[in-house]
Structure formats: structure tokens, C-alpha cells
């Protein structure tokens, strides 16, 4: 497998120096960048040692997925802006986690939610396909938002949209919060196209795993290997800890992968 990390664009060199295979930039940052700064970023990545494989954090509360849904033209304009730039960077896939865009007021009519979410994903997937980019919907957990808070629910939403370029990000941080098994993917293994990991603190804060987490990640990687997944895995944790903890986390993942391969 390839192991990467989700980081702001300014931390590209730090991720490369730590030995990661790729990086994953926030879609929101790409959307907000001035053109001159973005052109410089393209030069950095093009001449750098590792690619930007994916986007995380596709959008935020400024572009709601459910609830107060924007006009189609706004969804489409944003998608073109993000995917045009993603294509220039050679990015292959984009993940839609974005809990801030998936929160609902307590009195919101839940009968509207599925139709809104499907419509947003359909429009966005269609535009992603124009740029040769795959779109992956990501499960959140129930303390972060109110839509798509289990992997089976996220998988149901993806299947209901029915676009071949739309799949799943399996995020083992969210799966753990929701009590889902780390090594079983009943009914949706075929949809998994990307994976995210991190530790979970007492207040749901993310962190970099270390050698103390080796048994847990060996089990995760064994489960992924059992379904034939040999794709990419990104650590999604605070970028300010990348320099101090990134290399140790990467070493642990390489060892976990080796141990998983040796298990019967």
C-alpha cells in the first residue's frame, strides 16, 4: 500500500522529508487560493519527490451538502473551481467528508435530507468525471454531523446516487467512534477506494498513531488485505505534529502492513 498524510499545502516539504508516498491537500484551500499562489504550488509539486494523490476537506459550511442547500449553479461553480485546480496538480480522487457542510438544525425536516444529499453528490460527481477525478463520500461520526454517520449509511447513499465514479473513503477514526469493526466491511467492500486513519482522543481529537497502536493497525490492514484492497491510506491528524510524529507513524504502518501479510 501507499501511505500518505492530509496536510495544508505549506507542509508539502515536511511530508516528503518524513518519507510519505503522497500528500492529500484540502479542497477548501485550493478553492480559496489566489492564482499566483496556486501556480507556485503547482511548480512545487511538479518538481517535488512525491505527488498529491487526493483531496480531503472538499468543502465547508459555506457550501452545505444538506440543510440550507445552495443553488445548483453554486455547487457547479465550486466543483469546477476545485476540480480544475486538482486536475492541474495531477490529483486522482477527492473525498467529501466536510462535517461542517453536513450539520442540520434540530427541527429540520429529515424527509428532505436524502434527496438533498444525493443531488449534491450527483452534480459534484458529474463534474469530477469531466476532469478525470473520482469522488469518494466519507462517513463521519454522530458527534460531528447528522448525515452519513455510519459506513453502511454512507454506502447506501453512494449506491443510491448510482454514478460509477462515486465510491467511499473508509475512515477508521470515524468507524471507531461509531463502534464499527476495524476489519469487516459487510456489503460495501466493493465501494472502498481510499482510506483514512488517526487516533481518537478523549474529546474526539485526532492524532498520529505510534508503535503502541501496532496491534490495532495490523488488524485494520489485515482486514483491508482480506478484501483485496491494496490502495492508499492517509493519516489525517494535526499538521503541526507532522514533523515530530509523522515518521514514527509511517514506520509503524510499514511494520503493521508486514505483520498483516504474515498472518494466516
Image: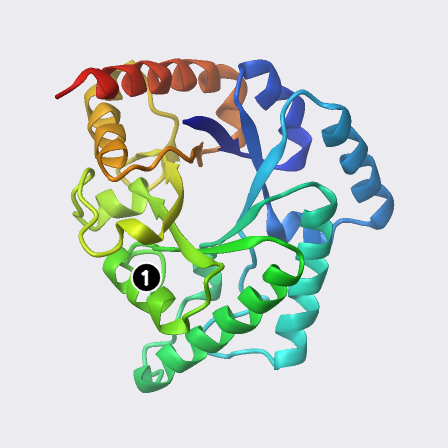
Residue ID for mark 1 = 154
User: Which class describes the residues within 10 Å of circle 1: few (<14), some (14-19), or many (20+)?
Assistant: many
Residue at 67% x, 57% y: name it: 131
Q: Quadrant of the N terminus?
A: top left
- How many marks the image carries: the answer is 1
Secondary structure beneath label 1: helix
Q: In the rendered view, would you say 17 is above or below 199?
A: above
- Compare residues 219 and 146 and report the one nearer the observer: 219
Camera-nearest residue between 51 and 228: 228
Q: Is residue 240 left or right of residue 90?
A: left
| Residue occupying image coordinates x 79% and y 43% | 38
Q: How is the image coloured?
A: rainbow
Image coords of residue 221 (percent x, y): 27, 29
Q: Is residue 18 left or right of residue 150?
A: right
Q: Which residue occupies the extreme left position in the image?
A: 264
> What residue is at 43 percent from the left and 73 percent from the top?
117
Q: Residue at x 60, y 14 (%)?
A: 17
86 vs 45: above or below: below
> Residue 44: where, in percent of width, then height?
76, 29
Locate the C terminus and report the quarter of the image it occupies: top left
Amino acid at each position: 500500500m501507499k501511505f500518505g498524510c492530509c496536510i495544508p499545502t505549506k507542509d508539502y516539504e515536511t511530508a516528503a522529508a518524513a518519507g510519505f508516498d503522497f500528500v492529500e491537500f484540502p479542497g477548501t484551500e485550493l478553492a480559496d487560493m489566489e492564482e499566483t499562489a496556486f501556480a507556485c504550488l503547482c511548480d512545487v509539486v511538479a518538481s517535488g519527490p512525491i505527488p498529491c494523490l487526493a483531496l480531503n476537506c472538499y468543502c465547508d459550511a459555506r457550501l452545505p451538502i444538506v440543510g440550507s442547500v445552495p443553488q445548483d449553479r453554486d455547487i457547479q461553480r465550486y466543483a469546477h473551481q476545485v476540480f480544475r485546480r486538482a486536475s492541474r496538480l495531477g490529483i486522482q480522487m477527492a473525498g467529501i467528508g466536510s462535517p461542517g457542510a453536513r450539520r442540520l438544525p434540530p427541527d429540520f425536516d429529515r424527509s428532505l435530507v436524502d434527496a438533498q444529499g444525493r443531488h449534491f453528490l450527483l452534480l459534484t460527481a458529474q463534474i469530477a468525471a469531466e476532469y478525470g477525478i473520482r469522488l469518494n463520500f466519507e462517513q463521519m461520526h454522530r458527534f460531528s454531523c447528522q448525515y452519513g454517520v455510519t459506513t453502511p449509511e454512507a454506502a447506501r447513499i453512494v449506491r443510491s446516487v448510482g454514478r460509477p465514479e462515486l465510491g467511499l473513503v473508509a475512515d477508521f477514526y470515524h468507524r471507531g467512534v461509531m463502534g464499527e469493526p476495524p476489519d469487516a466491511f459487510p456489503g460495501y467492500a466493493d465501494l472502498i477506494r481510499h482510506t483514512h486513519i488517526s487516533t481518537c482522543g478523549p474529546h474526539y481529537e485526532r492524532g498520529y498513531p505510534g508503535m503502541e497502536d501496532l496491534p490495532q493497525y495490523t488488524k485494520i490492514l489485515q482486514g483491508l488485505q482480506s478484501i483485496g484492497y491494496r490502495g492508499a491510506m492517509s493519516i489525517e491528524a494535526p499538521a503541526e505534529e507532522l514533523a515530530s510524529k509523522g515518521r514514527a507513524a509511517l514506520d509503524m504502518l510499514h511494520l503493521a502492513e508486514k505483520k498483516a501479510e504474515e498472518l494466516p
